[in-house]
Image (cartoon, grey):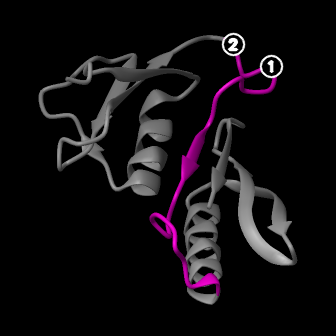
């Protein structure tokens, strides 16, 4: 049996960052979580881990050692044209929500993923 776990994240503005990641991942606010210096989101289907955000005074200062890959196209095999459309649509949605697109990575001339920053500068990818 797998161990249940929560991803803990530092944030300057926990509620804003939680709202961004809830949108990005299709998560919802954790019911009953009411901590003034934090926020928590959960998978509404109870399959993915909870993600908690706690207020810290300092901003991010170095590259992430781990990051989230949002896999909008699911698992292979893929229709590469449809996959690229899904990636670009999600990137556009997340830019509108405060993310920054950093660069596109291709494999054999085909879009593989887009490297992005969340609203507080944490790296993640949309694939």
* Badge 2 element: loop
Question: Which mark is drawn over residue 58?
Answer: 2
99 inside magenta stretch: no
Task: Kindly identify which residue carries mark 1.
Answer: 61
Residue depicted at 31% across the width and 36% down the height: 41
The x and y percentages for residue 68 are 57, 41
Q: Which residues are magenta?
A: 58-80
Circles 1 and 2, Cβ within 8 Å, touching? The answer is yes
86 sits left or right of 66 in the view: left
The x and y percentages for residue 81 are 64, 88
Give the camera-side residue of 19 and 42: 42
66 sits left or right of 11 in the view: right
97 sits left or right of 107 in the view: left
* Badge 1 element: loop
Q: Quadrant of residue 124?
A: top right
83 sits left or right of 51 in the view: right
Residue extending furthest toward the bottom: 81
Give the camera-side residue of 18 and 64: 64
Question: Which mark is drawn over residue 82?
Answer: none
Residue depicted at 53% across the width and 54% down the height: 70
Q: Is residue 33 above or below residue 104?
A: above
Residue depicted at 14% across the width and 34% down the height: 31
Gap between marks 1 and 2 measured at Cα: 8 Å
> Which secondary structure class fits the magenta region best?
loop
Front tag of 1 and 2: 1
Residue extending furthest toward the left: 32
């Amino acid at each position: 049996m797998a161990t249940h776990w929560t991803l803990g994240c530092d944030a300057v503005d926990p509620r804003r960052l939680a709202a961004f990641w809830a949108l990005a991942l299709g998560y919802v606010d954790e019911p009953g979580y009411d901590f003034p210096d934090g926020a928590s989101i959960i998978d509404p289907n109870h399959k993915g881990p909870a993600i908690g955000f706690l207020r810290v005074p300092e901003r991010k200062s170095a590259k992430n050692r781990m990051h989230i890959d949002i896999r909008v196209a699911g698992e292979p095999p893929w229709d590469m044209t449809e996959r690229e459309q899904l990636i670009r649509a999600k990137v556009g949605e997340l830019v509108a929500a405060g993310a920054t697109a950093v660069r596109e990575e291709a494999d054999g001339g085909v879009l593989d993923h887009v490297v992005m920053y969340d609203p507080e500068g944490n790296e993640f990818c949309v694939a």
